[in-house]
Image (tube, rainbow, N blue to C red):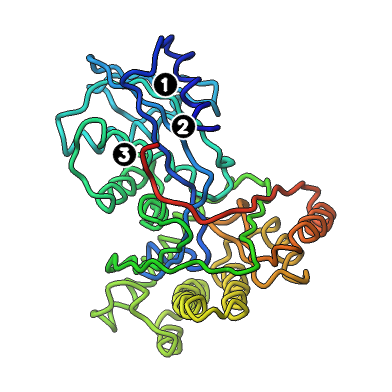
Amino acid sequence: MDNQLVKDCFMKEFSANSLEQVRTFFAPGRVNLIGEHTDYNGGFVFPTALTIGTYMAIRPREDELCTLTSTNFDQKVSFSLDDVTYKDEDDWGNYPKGIINELLKVTDSLKGIDVVYHGTIPNGAGLSSSASIGMVTAFGLSELFDVSLSRVELAKLCQRMENHFIGVNSGIMDQYAVGLCKEKHAIYLNTNTMEAHDVPLELGPHKIVITNTNKRRGLADSKYNERRAECEEALAIIKQYRPEWNTLSDAKVDDLAFIEATLDDDVLYRRVKHIVTENARTEDAKLALESGDLKRFGKRMLESHISLRDDYEVTGEALDALFDAQRVIDGCIGTRMTGAGFGGCSVSIVVEDQVAAFKEQVEKTYKALTGLEPSFYICEAGNGVSEI
C-alpha cells in the first residue's frame, strides 16, 4: 500500500505519464532492544529493524538538477550537483543532500534525480527516521548509478553524513541496523570491531510494543553531543593510566573502582559507569535471548533504563513516566527507553494476549502523569534496506 502510494505521488508530483525508469526502495526504522549510548564508545548494541520506515521513488535525469519531495513535508528541495551544501532552509532535505555530498567524494557517476519520499516513522520518535532516509537514499543512488559500495560501507557513509554534514556525532548502530538487519532477527554488534552476529528474535507468545511519548526530543541532539564530549573527556583522563584502552568499552565492571578513583569527578564517573555496565547487560541479554530466557532478558532491559536515568541522565520526565507506568503491568516482562532520550519512545516486551490491556492502562496512567497521549506500535522484526 505504501509502496503504491509513493509511486502514485511520484506520477502526480512530476507529471509522469508512466513509471518507466522509476525505481522504488525501502529502508526500515530501527529499535534498539538494549545497548544505549554505547555505539560511539566502542561498545555492544542489539538493534532490530522494523517494518515501518522510508519509501523512496526515484528517477534519474540527464542534467545535474536534483528535486526532492516528501509526502510528510510541504517543502520541496531543489539543488544542482555542483552546489550541494547544507542550508537551514532546506530542513529535512539536508539528509539526502548530505548523502549525495558523500557519494560525490567516491564517484563521478551521479546525475540529477527526481525523488519522492514517503515515511511511516513518526518524526522525532527516536526510531531512526534520519538513518532510514539516509540509507534509502545511499542504497538507492548506489543501485541507480552503479556505485560499488557494500552495505557496511554505505552505513559508514551515512554516519559520516550525520557527523559532518548535519553535525550530530552519531555512532554507527542506527545506520548498520537499517542497512543489514534480517527479518525476525536482531543484530548483536560490536561497534569497535564491527563484528556482528544475527540472533533469532524468538519471542514466543510476546510482542514488541513501541510506545511513543509524543514529546518531541528537543534536547536530544544537544545532550547527545554533550554526553559524547563527556565520554571523550573521561577517556582522555583514563588513558593517562591505561594507554592501551582505546575506548571506554575496553573497561570492564571490575575496573569501576579504579575508574572512580582516577576520574575524581562524579558526573564523568557516572557516565563511564553506564557505558561499562550497559555493555555487560547487553552481553548477558544476548545470552538470555539465545537460551530462551525472556524473563532474564526483560530484567536487563529494566536495569538499562535505570542506568540511563540515574547515571547517564538522558531519560527525562516523559520517558520516566512511561517506564514507571509500564514496568508494573502484568504481562510486561521488560521495558526501557530507546534512542537518544529526552522524549521519543520506549520499547517493551509484552505477552501478546495482554497487549490491549497494557495499552489501555499505560495510556491512562501516562496521561494522568504528563497530560500527553501516547501512541503505540505493535512491531515485527523486518529486513534492512532493499529495492521493492
Mark sitting on residue 92: 2
For label 3, the crowd category at 10 Å Cα-Cα, with few meaning under 14, some 14 to 19 and many 20 or more, is many
Place of residue 109 in the rendered image (x, y in percent of width and height, measured from the top left): 16, 29
Mark sitting on residue 63: none
Q: Are marks 2 and 1 in contact (CB under 8 Å)?
A: yes
For disc 3, the marked residue is: 138
Q: Identify the element where label 3 is drawn.
A: helix
Q: Residue at x 45, y 89 (%)?
A: 257
Left or right, 192 with respect to 110, comes to right
What's the residue type where badge 3 is placed?
Ala
| Nearer to the camera, 160 or 118 | 118
Place of residue 265 in the rendered image (x, y in percent of width and height, measured from the top left): 48, 76
- Where residue 123 sits, quadrant-wise, is top right
Mark 2 or mark 1, which has the lower sequence index? Answer: 1
For disc 1, the marked residue is: 77
Q: Is residue 167 visible?
A: yes
